[in-house]
Amino acid sequence: MAICAGCGIDTELHELGVPICTSCISKRESSNPLLADLSLEITHTRDLYFKAMRALAPFQAPGERRPNGSRHGSEAMRLEDRAKIAGEKYWEALRCYVETLRRETGKSRSA
Ligand SMILES: [Zn+2]
């Protein structure tokens, strides 16, 4: 059992490594448009990332050997690039959210 970073009650819920309770999450997002935006951004980038990974999955099957330079080879490389970029955007959105969250919870604690 961890202590919610926002209000200090016991919580089982962790958000990106930060203990948080559900009421703090909804309170935070309704009172803070920036966090709500960032939260949407995470959902959006995660969707794109998962889609890119799903598209790439068939090319990453074990035992899959395709000659370099074939149509499939370049398609796989294209999908790999797309998944990598989508993953970076997703990670960046998560990082932004956590940083803002830490700033905001620090603010409300000292207030
Ligand atoms: Zn809380």
Image (cartoon, rainbow, N blue to C red):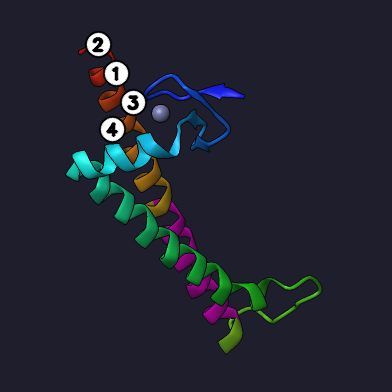
Task: Give the mark nearer the N terminus: 3 vs 2.
Answer: 3
Question: Residue 41 occupies which quadrant of the picture?
Answer: bottom left
Q: Which residue is mark 3?
A: 102
Q: Residue at x 53, y 72 (%)?
A: 77
Q: Are marks 1 and 2 in contact (CB under 8 Å)?
A: yes
Marks 4 and 3, how far apart at CA: 5 Å
Residue range (magenta) = 73-88
Task: Give the mark nearer the N terminus: 1 vs 4.
Answer: 4
Q: Which residue is mark 1?
A: 106
Q: Are marks 1 and 3 in contact (CB under 8 Å)?
A: yes
Q: List x then y, in percent, for residue 75.
A: 53, 81
Quarter of the picture for ligand 1? top left
The residue tagged with tag 3: helix, strand or loop? helix
Q: Which residue is mark 4?
A: 100
Q: Residue at x 32, y 32 (%)?
A: 101
Marks 2 and 4, how far apart at CA: 16 Å
